[in-house]
Amino acid sequence: MTRTPAGAAAAAASGHSGSAGQQPAALPKRVLLQGRYEALAMLRNGEQLILAVVLPLLALVGLTVTPLLDGMGASRINVAVPGILALCAMSTAFTGQGIATGFDRRYGVLRFLSTTPLGRGGLIAGKVISVLAVLCIQVAVVSAVALALGWQPTAAGWLPGLALLALGAAAFTALGLLVAGTVRPEATLAITNLLWILLGALGGIVIPADKLPAAAQPAVGFLPSGALGESLREAFLNGAVDVGAALILLLWALVAGAAAIRWFKWN
């Protein structure tokens, strides 16, 4: 019998293939299996792959060959890469996860999985793991291309940079789940794609706030996109931690997470 997506997810959630008499695996294993299933589903989706890898790489090359970032640092590529890594986090955690969750909700997959041994908490944990797994692949691919293009990151910036990237992914995952759990899937598709474009272009995530219109600059730093972009540039360019930006990201993660818990609808 051909296994449906819901059936495959249920097998991951229970930790076995569905044979009679088998007991569910331990919760950590169930969560890891669910995370692996969701990560592979994202990577096998052509549209998700374009959003997660192809578009960020095109943006990286575009920023490297144009004078848009001139005057912001020692080289265009050094200024461009942190913003592109931030864009990767937003693409996977917010847009990709939001759309996937929205349609899982529509087709009853979320409601079904919440009744398996995985449970609602395990399902959310699996989604977080899938986002982090895909983000690791994105970081590896973007870093490899960037190094080939001459990227020279500050060695001291890697640890705070990766920590901030994970914090940003948590904030955007919470926002994606909030949207996916409160509006119709078609609206989720429209909202997440529109915000990806707006935040990517004008939210300080790829283009530093100093290069944006003066009227928009004061607000950009308080957006999750602006906070993540600026904090990663500070880390990889100067090896320092922008404490203010990190606190803004943490606040977004906590508020959006609390709102998602409060208003998320499983059916």
Image (spheres, rainbow, N blue to C red):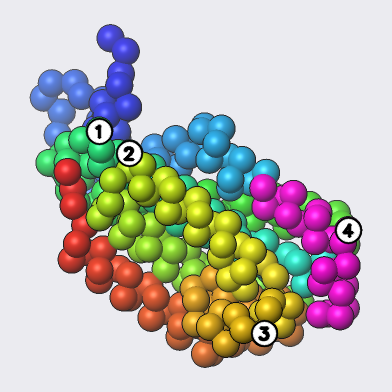
Q: Quadrant location of the C terminus?
A: top left
Q: For label 4, count other residues whose C-alpha is less than 10 Å away and answer few (under 14), some (14-19) or many (20+).
A: few
Badge 2 element: helix
* Horizontal arrangement in the rendering, residue 109 relative to residue 116 (left or right): right
* Disc 4/disc 2 C-alpha distance (Å): 38 Å
Q: Residue 148's quadrant in the figure?
A: bottom right
Q: Residue at x 73, y 65 (%)?
A: 81
Given residues 67 and 121, the one toward you in this image is 67
Cβ atoms at labels 1 and 4 below 8 Å apart: no
Could you tell me how far apart the alpha carbons at marks 1 and 2 are, in whole angstroms? 6 Å
Among the two numbered marks 1 and 4 on one chain, the one whose residue lies closer to the N terminus: 4
Tag 2–tag 3 contact (CB < 8 Å) = no
Look at the numbered discs 1 and 3 and tell me whether their residues touch, using CB distance below 8 Å: no
Q: Disc 2 and disc 3: Cα gap in Å?
A: 39 Å
User: Which mark, residue 252?
Assistant: none
Find out whether the residues at labels 1 and 2 contact each other: C-beta distance under 8 Å. yes
Identify residue for label 3. Answer: 214
The disc label shown at residue 107, or none: 1
Q: Amino acid at mark 3?
A: Ala
- In the rendered image of this protein, does residue 219 appear above or below residue 60? below
Q: Amino acid at mark 2?
A: Phe
User: Comparing marks 2 and 3, which lies closer to the viewer?
Assistant: 3
Mark sitting earlier along the chain (4/3): 4
Give the Cα distance between marks 1 and 3.
44 Å
- Between circles 1 and 3, the one closer to the viewer is 3
Segment colored magenta: 55-76
For the stretch drawn in magenta, the main secondary structure is: helix
**Residue wearing tag 2:** 103
The percent position of residue 151, horizontal first and vertical second, equals 83, 65
- Residue at 48% across / 39% down in the picture? 42
Camera-side residue of 260 and 121: 260
